Amino acid sequence: MIHVIAVITAKPGQRESILTHFRANVPAVLAEKGCIEYGAAVDVEPALKFQTAYGPDTFVVIEKWESMEALGAHAAAPHMAAYAGKTKEFIASRAIHILQPA
């Protein structure tokens, strides 16, 4: 199994714009062969004292895939290219972490 943690930071005030497009794309991603989990998460408010918050412009995409092949197909899917085109103007930065169980 492959885990992906994608940290997406929007330009100030644009997180909800990206999340609107993200939510619209979720059904297509969940229908992909090899997709186990795919969803977005934001900071819990109010936070606990030990939490390191991402802040109001950032969200995290949590993904699980059956294999690297499935993840590669996901990255090349036409709906992902369309999503990228719709959101690129709103994104300040992104960091993609691909992990495997230890």
Image (cartoon, rainbow, N blue to C red):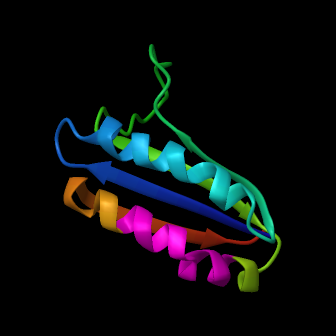
Q: Quadrant of the C terminus?
A: bottom right
Q: Is residue 68 left or right of residue 95?
A: right
Q: Is residue 89 left or right of residue 46?
A: left
Residue 41 appears anywhere in the view: yes
Residue that appears at 38% across and 54% down: 8
In magenta stretch: residue 73: yes
Q: Quadrant of the N terminus?
A: bottom right
- Above or below 25: residue 98: below
Look at the magenta stretch and give its main secondary structure.
helix
Q: Find residue 56 and report its horizontal and vertical position in percent.
A: 30, 32
Tell which residue pokes out farthest to the top in this image: 46
- Above or below 95: residue 62: above
Q: Which residues are magenta?
A: 71-84
- Above or below 6: residue 9: above
Q: Find residue 40 and report its horizontal and vertical position in percent.
A: 55, 43
Q: Find residue 7 and report its horizontal and vertical position in percent.
A: 43, 55
Q: Is residue 62 left or right of residue 56?
A: right
Closer to us: 65 or 83: 83
Count the labels in the image. 0
Residue 102 appears anywhere in the view: no
Residue that appears at 45% across and 17% down: 45
- Above or below 91: residue 34: below
Residue 15 sits in which quadrant?
A: top left
Tell which residue pokes out farthest to the left in this image: 12
Residue that appears at 72% across and 56% down: 30
Residue that appears at 52% across and 76% down: 78
Q: Find residue 98 and report its horizontal and vertical position in percent.
A: 60, 72
Residue 31 sits in which quadrant?
A: bottom right
In magenta stretch: residue 21: no
